Amino acid sequence: EAGRRVQEELRRPATRLERIQRGGSLEGTDLAAIDRTDELGLEDHANPRTAPAAPTDRALPVAIFEEEKVRVESGRWWDHPKVNLLRRTLDADRDGHPELVRYVDAETGHLFRQEEDRNYDGVTDAWSDYRSGVVVARVLDSNDDGNPDVWERYHGTRMTVREIDRDDDGVRDAFYRYEGGSLIEERHDADNDGRVDLRIVYADRRRIRDEEDQDKDGRMDTWRSYVVTDGVELVSRIERDKKGRGFADTFETFGAQDGVAVLLKREEDVNGDGEVDIISHYENGKLVRREIANPDLVPL
């Protein structure tokens, strides 16, 4: 009974990151909903463009742990020197598989490292490193298959980096970077070839541009810029490398209409000389006028 109570005390609600779909792009986020949750002070729970808070550790009495002195060689877990630690182990149900192991600096009393079995299946699935008692890095096995698939770094009270192996093949394929408490960049390798094929850049929790390798040949071929109109994130310009020459040759300009982006103008460099050869004008999504600099470049 005592063991059950300790386990219940250790359990905590799923964090926001554990509720968000693993590795999903944030490009479809509803900005209006984000603004409403910010006003309510709920950004840590509902705004995926806010840097997640660093995990907090439950204060537990030392008496419930088994304790032993250990000497850990330098660099065992990170670039630390040789250190004397207290290894505190909690096996509440006495099944031989500890739910929590804490390594504490014997001199300062600061937490040095922590290993957890978060779902109590007998297998460790979270490893956290600390500096001066403050968490700086964490590795997770989020799907409980025995292999780490999430890597996180923290500074102060907020996450700075999160990397994910979405398909559990041992290769990281989604990358998130935060500064000043906000997401500033996400990158994705959708086809698992080891090369990023989508990069999204944010400012003030708003997407401002992205670039994508749509044909997956290892080179970016589409560049998009965005504006926020009436709280809605809309594409304002798209540049494309349609002929695979390594530079943009088609340029599209968009405007806002009834809350959606509509094409206004398309400019094309047909022969790749850096000069626009064709300008097409649109109204309500339909071509209304075309300007051709060199008719020889346009087949009839």
Image (tube, rainbow, N blue to C red):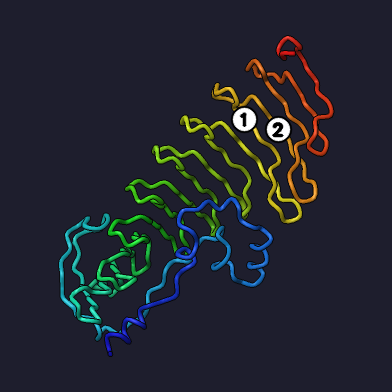
Query: Would you say 23 lies left or right of 131 here?
Result: right
Give x and y (percent) for residue 78: 27, 56
The structure residue drawn at horizontal position 76% and vertical position 12%, both measured from the top left corner, is: 295
Give x and y (percent) for residue 17: 47, 63
Residue that carries the numbered disc 1 in the rendered image: 240
Whether residue 268 is situated above or below residue 91 in the rendered picture: above
**Quadrant of the rendering where the N terminus is positioned:** bottom left
Residue 299 visible = yes
Query: Would you say 175 lies left or right of 60 here?
Result: right
Q: Are marks 1 and 2 in contact (CB under 8 Å)?
A: yes
The structure residue drawn at horizontal position 62% and vertical position 49%, both measured from the top left corner, is: 207
Say which amino acid is labelled 2: Glu
Q: Earlier in the sequence, mark 1 or mark 2?
A: 1
Q: Secondary structure at mark 2?
A: strand
Query: Would you say 183 lies left or right of 218 here?
Result: right
Residue that carries the numbered disc 2 in the rendered image: 252
